[in-house]
Structure formats: C-alpha cells, structure tokens
Image (cartoon, rainbow, N blue to C red):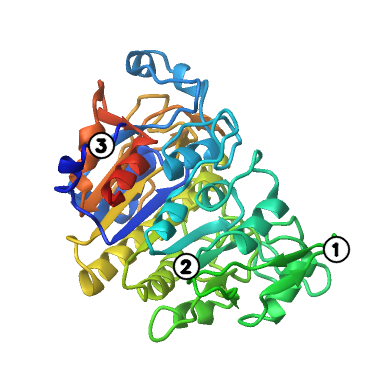
Amino acid sequence: MALSSSCQKSTLPHPKNVIIMIGDGMGYNNVKAADCYFGMSSLSRFPITAAVATYYAGSGYDPAQAWSDPSYITKDHTESAAAATALATGYKTSLGTIGLSATGDTLMNLTEFAKKNGKATGVITSVPFSHATPAAFLVHNSSRSNYIRIAYDILFRTRADVVMGCGNPEYDDDGVALHDDWNYAGYVGDSVTWKTLKEGSGTVTEVMTADGGRRTVQDVNGDGIPDPWTVITSASDFKTLASGPTPARVLGCPEVYSTLQQARKMAGGESDDSPPFVTPFIATAPTLAEMTRGTVNVLDNNPSGFFLMVEGGAIDWANHGNQKGRMLEEMQGFRDAVDAVIAWVNANSSWDETLLIVTADHECGNLWGGEPFAPVVCNGNGNLPVLKYNSHDHTNSLVAVFAWGAGSTELLKAADETDPVRGVYIQNNEIPLTIFRLWDKN
C-alpha cells in the first residue's frame, strides 16, 4: 500500500494510542462459538469489521476455491511467525521467520516505529513472551524456535516499556513450584539470566549469561542510562499494577510455565469435549485482562501515547488440541481483555485519540458445526454449541478484523478484494501499513 501524498496525510487522524489485540488461531467460528456459550461480546459493537487474508509470502488465497473445495484451505496455510511478522511490519514473509523479510532483510516493526515517535510500547501474551507472535512485534530472528536468543533480544536489545508472558521456569503448567528442578526450555533466556533478573529486579542493568556473555538492558527513555526491568511474577503484583503509581519498566512473568490456564491438567472427568471451567483455574495466575489493565496503567504515563499488542495466545493451543471447553475458556479470557481495553479508553482516553484493532493471525482447527461449511449451531447460553474440529492444524481461511476509534475507517480503504461468504477483505500486512500511514508525520 503506497503512502498518501502530503496534502492527503494532513487530513488523516493521528491516533495518540494504538492497541492491537490478536486472538491466536481465532477463526470466525471461534468467535461464534463463544457468542453462543457466553452471549454476544463487545466485538459485536465495533463499528468497522472486515475479513483478513492470512497467507504467507509466495502463497495465496482463492475465494472461489476456498468455498468449493473443502481441502483447499488445509493447504499452504501460514503459522504464527510469518503471520505476526505481517501484522507487525507490513510485509508478508516466509514460514517460521520473525521480523525479517522473505529475503532476510530486517523489517521495522510497530513497537520500533512507536519508539521513533516518542511513544511507550508494550507486548503481552497468555503464552511465553518469546513465542512467535509477541516476538514478531519486538525482535528479528530467522527462526521462531531460537527461544533463548529471542528472549535475550527482547530483554536486552529492545526498548519496550512492558513485556508480559509465560515461560517462568520455576513453575510447572499447574502453577506448582519446582524449587531446584526447573522446567527449563529457554523461554526467558538461560537460567543464569532469569535468576539475576528476578533477584535484582529494579536495579540490574547488566547480567552475565550461562555462556559467559554479558548483556546490558536498553535505555528506554533516552536519558543515556540503561533502564532496568522491574520483574513481577505473583498474581497480586499484576493486580496491584492496574492502579496507582507504577515502575518505569515492567517484565511480567506469571508463576506458571507455558500458558496462563490452557495447559493445566484436566481433572474432575474433564475431556476435550467437556464444557469450560470443569477443572478449577490456577488461582496464582493472573488473567489476561489483569495483565492488560496493569500494562496500560504503565504505558499511559507517557504523554505522547503508546502502542500495545495483546495476544490471546492459548486460543491456538486449545484449537490444536481440539479442546472445545478450553477453547471457550481462552476465548472468554480474550474477550475480557478486550473489555478491559474498552473500559480504559472510555475512562482514561477517548475514541478520538485511541485506535483499537482486534484480529487473528490465522484460523486453527478448521472448526465448523460439522463437516466443513456446516454452520455452528447455538444451544443457548451455557450450553456447548454444535461444534466439530476437522483438523489439528492451521488453515488458510479468512479471519475477522474489528476496529474502533481514531483512523479505524482507513482500514476499509484497503479492502479491495471480495469473498463470496465473508465479503470484503484486506491482507494482513495492510493492517500495520494503515497504522504506519496514520502515524507518519511527513
């Protein structure tokens, strides 16, 4: 998408704050299933809606084939690294690639662009913060699997004001402390780095790593002095962060390993086909909404505004596992986070200065009411709708985008393609291109 001319750009809205919320793996039928079970969400009130094509560089989407051949959408589908890179940078790229073009060039992402504009930045997720989607909004790497290096770069090479996500090596997926037997996969860097950061929270600007290296945190506010992370882990700390004075820079890593809730052990007879909330939640883990409220309370200290990405990452994990109840739990957690943002805008900002975009990186699970194209059938609130997963993997289906606030109508100007069922649609990379255009000062 080409930038408008100078005279045209002067008439565009220039949002002070931009918030992108990504339901990882959240297809149209995830949204509908949650509406069936819990009632209509606030997404139904968003004034701007369209469909989004999610395919990666070198692939494509054919609307006619997508609705005539059920096998078509199961081929050439994207994954979170390529899709999130498109959503963060404005460029489609190769599978597995974080923040790089298909030819290996480093791409500027929205958090970096926001910093160039003097804004605060935050990236939060319900899965490890070094996973593909949050990573694509922060760093650059040729492989999404390089967790330790990605974590190092997030912690020591970015200027993000807030990073929150799972991966705490001191706890298992049920939030049980592991003491000296850490559950370690490198989601937070190496063990030496994590221990030093946590024990020296708020003071450590330089740490040693297990490989003998030395890493220094970045200067976030431009005063020439490295700004240390304040590390929070307890649910009470996340709740406290939502109001009152805040640290300048926050790393939040809840006391749980891979997800806030989705990966906890099933109990009480729960199965993949059970309704939500059969197994009690982990009481020591914050909700995504609580993490969101705390993050905006930190970021809105910047008078120039902020950029925030919030990911409901475990929607995808539940879809991969074909877990109907866990999917609905994750959908409700994501919906609650959306409501938290809306409440913040209404109480502390306005829709004239804040742009909120809610979308997905791709669909996962090929979820329908039965075989592909069969509609999801509601059975009343509190009852599982008629649902069937037709895959354990991603698909090339269109997903939805919802927009509200300053500049939201600009998204529709990119909707120049039409799907016979979903209507007008845009490319995923046109979402950040629109934001870049709104924020461009030239």
Which residue is the site of mark 2? 287
- Structural distance between the alpha carbons of marks 3 and 1: 50 Å
Kind of residue sitting beneath label 3: Ala
Instruction: Please tell me whether mark 1 sits on a helix, a strand or a loop.
Output: loop
Position of 416 with respect to 259 (left or right) is left
Camera-side mark, 1 or 2: 1
Q: Earlier in the sequence, mark 3 or mark 1?
A: 3
In the rendered image, the vertical position of residue 331 relative to residue 224, given as above or below: above
Residue, far bottom: 244
Residue 394 pos. (x, y %): 52, 33
Marks 3/2: CA distance? Answer: 28 Å
Residue 76 lies, in percent from the top left, at 52, 22
Placement of 72 over or under 216, stated as above or below: above
Q: Please tell me whether mark 3 or mark 1 is closer to you in this view.
A: 1
Quadrant of the image occupied by residue 63: top left
Q: CA distance from mark 1 to mark 2?
A: 36 Å
User: Nearest the camera: 12 or 61?
Assistant: 12
Q: Which residue is mark 1?
A: 212
Type of residue at label 1?
Answer: Gly
Q: Position of residue 192 (x, y in %)?
A: 79, 69
Residue 111 appears in which quarter of the rendering?
Answer: bottom left
User: Camera-side residue: 422 or 211?
Assistant: 211
Q: Residue at x 26, y 48 (%)?
A: 438
Residue 367 position in % (x across, y down): 43, 34
Dot 1 alpha-carbon crowd within 10 angstroms: few under 14, some 14 to 19, many 20 or more: few
Q: Is residue 425 above or below residue 193?
A: above
Say which residue label 3 marks. Answer: 50
Residue 232 visible to the viewer: no
